Amino acid sequence: MPKPPVHEDVNPKQRQYEAMVRALSADLYRFAWWLTRSESVAQDLVQETFLRAWKNLDALRDAESTKSWLFTILRREHARLYERKRLEVVELDDNIAEDAAFASPERSSDAAQVRDAIGRLPDKYREPLAMQVLAGMSADEIAASTGQKPGAVMTQLFRARQQLKRLLGGRAAAEGSRT
Amino acid sequence: MNCLDFRRRVGAEPRSRDPELLAHRDSCRDGCAAFWQRAQRFEDDLEAGMAIPVPDGLADRILLAQATGERRTQIGRRRAWMAMAASVLIAFAGVGMLWRYTDQHSLEAMAVAHMPGEMDALALTRPMTDDDVAAGFIGRATQLKGPAPAMVTYVHDCVVGQYPVVHAVTRMDDEPVVALYMPGKMDGKPGTFHRDGWDGREVQLRGGTLLLLAQGPSHKAMDTAERGWRAAIDGSNLTVSL
């Protein structure tokens, strides 16, 4: 008689956790990387986030909100880490002119340049942008997670994109004919 | 929704599927559809830029860390339970040993343990004189204050446990009753007991403790022996204690 597969013995909580890790660890790592810009710290953060999630898995009622729940945990873990280590963070000038707020966004095929530009965004713009792009969180969800008003988050998301377009502006002008 | 609202909204949430937003895109003749298209392409680039490479085996390492932590927790929990169970076991064993020690060192246990070497004394039938009985007690520095009980067939000084005693036997209706008198022992616990085939009675007298032992005796024999020894040692013919 054939032996039943091992996974049948795994309890549902463990199965749920494993599925969660396999499905979401990559996006969570990317978010952590964009918060810390360090591969090792990002990995530690993701690990810590999932361990905390395991301990509190029973508190997760809605499976659909798993991703935003994990992103919120990771964000808190990062804040804790930041408090502990007092990492040196250099803020870029946030007062870039907004006169071209409705200029056409330009296409950039060079991911490295886009990455560099994202890296130069101030934290307060990069963080909600990463939550939106990587986790697919709505402005309301980001607001709930970061303790801000949805309107303020909308403004941050808008300005984040405008700054990116400006930072990519030189190349964007050259590609203008494509748009 | 006007064009300004539309472009503000797309600038912040380009992937929104809000029907109002999409309706404006489809109906606007001022270039909002093109604006939306460019926003989507920009978003594609943004997503590609953000998708930095993920280290190999990340998910496996996370699962391993969780499994290891969980195992440690389980081992810790199991150890705590085992420690608790061991503590309870040790406590029970300790209490059991203490109870056993206390029981084995009780007066009744020591008295019964003394008897196997004195069984011959139970078979004696010839009554002793009052003087012989009194002399036996003097050996333990005890002066009888009253007449010795009738039919005392044996008197000897012995040691029971750590107590020096006068060991005597009385016989009534062919029932021998052993009397162990411990002069100076004032912390006796009056009462009766049954142990290893012996019926016993502990009596507190004025100058010491009297312990009566017999095998299957009648109440009458025990009462008579108690009354007789109480009268002889304390000098008063009081009623029996039990």
Image (tube, rainbow, N blue to C red):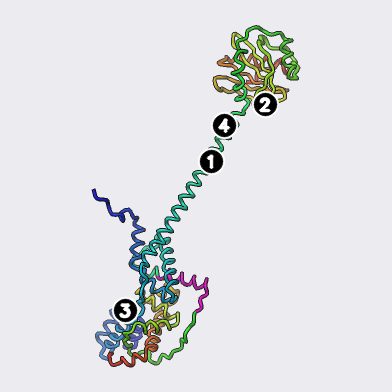
The answer to whether any part of residue B49 appears in the image is yes
Q: How far apart are the alpha carbons under marks 2 and 3? A: 97 Å
Pointer 1: what residue?
B90
The answer to whether any part of residue B220 appears in the image is no
Of helix, strand and loop, which one carries label 1?
Answer: helix
Residue drawn at point x = 45 percent, y = 80 percent: A124
Q: Main secondary structure of the magenta part?
A: helix
Residue B151: x and y in percent read 66, 9
Relative placement, left or right, of B167 versus A174 is right
Q: Quadrant of residue B141?
A: top right
Answer whether residue B217 is magenta in the image: no
> Residue B100: which disc?
4
Q: Are marks 2 and 3 on the same chain?
A: yes
Say which amino acid is labelled 1: Ile
Q: How far apart are the alpha carbons under marks 1 and 2? A: 30 Å
Q: Nearer the viewer, residue B181 or A36?
A: A36
Q: Mark 3 or mark 1, which is nearer the start of the sequence?
A: 3
| Quadrant of the drawing holding the C terminus of chain A | bottom left
- Stretch of the chain drawn in magenta: A71-88
**Mark whose residue sits in front, 3 or 4:** 4
Q: How far apart are the alpha carbons under marks 1 and 3? A: 68 Å
Pointer 3: what residue?
B16
Residue A57: x and y in percent read 39, 61
Q: How far apart are the alpha carbons under marks 3 and 4? A: 82 Å
Q: Mark 1 or mark 4, which is nearer the start of the sequence?
A: 1
Relative placement, left or right, of B222 versus B131 is left
